[in-house]
Amino acid sequence: MSSPAATARSAVGQAEARLGLAEFLLSCDDLQECARRSLEWLTEYAGARAAGCLLVDGEHGRLHLIASTGVGMPRDFWADLEDRTHPLVAAALGTAVVTFNDRRGDRRPSPLGRLPIVAQPMYARVGRESVPAGLLVVSPPSANPRLLSWVAGIVAPPIVRLSRSRLLTESDRRMRRERTLLDAVPDPILLTDPEGRVLIANSRAKALLVGAEGESEGRRRAVALNNMLFSSALAQSAMQEVGRRELLLVDPVEGSDLLFELLSTVAPDTREGTSLVSILRNISDLRRASEEIEENYRRLRIAEADVRAERDRLDLIIDSVADPILVTDAAGALVMMNTPAQRLFSVGPGSPPEHAVRVQANDAHFSAFVSNLLFAPEGERRRGEIGLVDPETGQSLPVEAVSGKIYSEHGEVTAIVTVLHDRTEEIERAHLYEELKKASALLEERVRQATSELVGQNELLRRQRIELEQASAAKSQFLANMSHEFRTPLNAILGYTSLLLQGVSGPMSAPQERNLGRVDSNARHLLAIINDILDISRIEAGKMPLHLSTFPLPALVQEVVAELEPLIERSKLSVRVDVGRKSPSLASDRAKVKQIVLNLVTNAIKFTPSGSVIVSARYDTDRKEVTIAVRDTGIGIKPEDQERVFEDFRQADNSPAREYGGAGLGLAICRRLAQMLEGRVELQSAVGQGSTFTLTLPVRLRRR
Amino acid sequence: MPDKKASRPGGVREPGPLILVVDDFEDNREMYTQFLRFSGYRVAEAVDGVDAIAKAAALRPDLIVMDLSLPRMDGWEATRRLKKDPQTSHIPVVALTGHALAGHEEGARNAGCDSFVTKPCIPADLEAEVRRILAEKAGVRGGR
């Protein structure tokens, strides 16, 4: 089959075929495809009728078939590489080409039955070493050994590469999964040899214990320090069999301390030798957590203390408020109350049962009030009155209650605060005010009544005054009329008496004449009384007009004495007049002056049983006054009676059996008349020493 | 008219002057009449002002004693009329009153009374006043 032409042609073809195979193998990345193509090439170009390609699988320790054509080998053929007696294994691990069952020379039995084969081992370079890569088996053994060797040489590297890559891919996948697993563990995990060298480390462990190139000096030092600390800990834990200890490392990146719990377990491995699995559990977080918890607890304590202090202060404030304050929760249950509230809503130990009853009543009232607010969806606060009872005294205690809702951050009602305001005082005050108002109204009414009474009385008084004036006028009129009415019969009495006494009706006997004389004198006395009464009435009625004239005083006094001559004669008294001739004339009411003097002298004579009556007049130029004094040596007047004698109808002796007659109006009239004349009548007297009446008058009475 | 008792006090010879006594109170009128007759006068009587004017006009008395408080016509009014009447205006009038109140005397004089005597006035005192007025009148007359 190989003619020179063919050889020549095949030579050219061979060169192109080699290039084609080489190019294919360079670009092929499938192990079996590489093997099969190589076998096809051998069949085409190297005179092989059957061929097979076996691979040395170091990983599994097997020599197994990759691809074959016509050699009659099972597809999953494999032989243990350890089995050096196996001809193919031996061939693969050997360096020489081995011929099996070749009729021409070697008669070694073919591992492939009767089929004569030639086995070409394949070696590939791994690093500097040349390692067995596989075995090419070709039949017939006459196939071009040069091409076979060339194919073995050219196919070995890609087969090794591809088989390894295939293995790598598989183990890598596994490894990666394991790595992912390991790396997923947040705790550092390490596998170390007994010397402490790190065999496997997960990413967390690497970060701590394995330095990377280009790291900063700080990080390298940290890693070095960590390694030292780790080795030392490992050594110590190894001595303790199962180690469980704390290990403080440095975070190379953060520079912070990391606290780990080191768990080391010895992992026996027959092939690789005993190693140590270490798991570092980061407990810095735990520590931090515990520290945080402690810190939090501490803070809580402080906060609690603060809250307590705050609450104490609040309690103090609340307690210091005189008004009861109550806090109820959202269910209406009492949560807190201040001291004033406790008085109303709590029962002290040993209190009498009625206290508890009253407290219950209070509680019921209060609860009703608060629940009204609680169950009112609208309304933040409520104000109203509650009729409470003082538990101790049982007295009613009206209070004004103001309740307000307290909301949480989430807007839920958490509490209701109620402040009670004792309204007793207010009500008391209002009551007092009412009373006061009533009293005031009463007072006003009384004042009004009193005023109206007063007005009435004033009116009454006015009427009475008018009536009195009218009565007075009527009295004066009456007296004037009466005096006329008196005078008329008296005129007849006196007249007829005088007729009889004068003998107009014939002569009378002496006793008749004497008795008639008594009628006459009594009638005259009565007349004098009537005249006096008339004078008083006239003076009081203001109907005693003044008739002013100028007259000498001595003549007036002489006239008086002359008029009284009959009386003087009867009295047997010495009556002297001592009035200077040179005394000036008086400007006054002559009749009235005369009446006064007449009265005074008459009195003096009447009340002087014996002795004398002296009438004297003096003129005071400085005061322009005239004094007419009538002095007697009579009975005198007691000092206590000296004023009374000037009163109406008075005599010093007011007894019915009085010795001296007269109406007792004389001095009263004198004093009034003197006053009309702007003068006065005065008295000096002593009992038994006589009396001196003095009339003082202005020399000139001014006309009014 | 000459009386048997003309020689009594007053001593008026006959025929005595005619005095008209005007008083509504009979006792007083009678009393003065008695005494004046006792004293030698002729006396006529009237009981009120109207009666007085009539009697005065009819009798032309020498003097009239006129009580001022009279029924029908009081003494003032009667005096005023008498004094207005030329037939009687020359007759002196002695007013007699129990009213001693102010104004009576003045009122009486304004009315034309020649004299004013306050009651009580005993007959003798009245006769003295009557005599005084008659003498006064006679004197005036005599003077002419």
Image (cartoon, coloured by chain):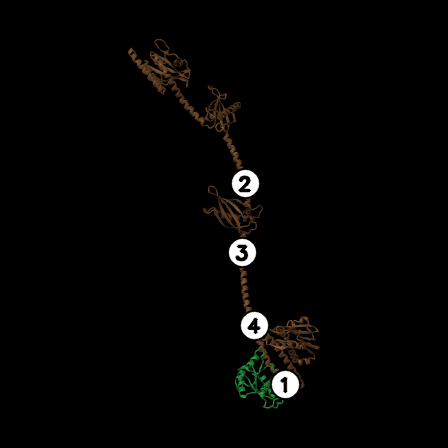
Q: Are marks 4 and 2 in contact (CB under 8 Å)?
A: no
Secondary structure beneath label 1: helix
Q: The numbered mark 2 sits on a residue in which chain?
A: A
Question: Which residue is under mark 3?
Answer: A433
Question: Which residue is under mark 4?
Answer: A469
Q: Amino acid at mark 1?
A: Leu
Q: Amino acid at mark 4?
A: Glu
Mark 4 or 2, closer to the camera: 4
Separation of residues labelled 1 and 2 (CA atoms): 136 Å
Residue B42 seen in the figure: no
Question: Which residue is under mark 2?
Answer: A308
User: Residue A668 location, x and y as percent?
Assistant: 63, 74
Q: Amino acid at mark 2?
A: Arg
Mark 4 or 3, closer to the camera: 4
Separation of residues labelled 4 and 1 (CA atoms): 45 Å
Mark 3 or 1, closer to the camera: 1
Q: Colour of chain B?
A: green
Which of the 4 image quarters holds residue A625? bottom right
Q: Residues within 10 Å of mark 1 (few under 14, many from 20)?
A: some
Residue nearer the viewer, A455 or A269: A455
Residue nearer the viewer, A170 or A77: A170
Question: Which residue is under mark 1?
Answer: A500
Q: Colour of chain A?
A: brown
Q: Are marks 2 and 3 in contact (CB under 8 Å)?
A: no
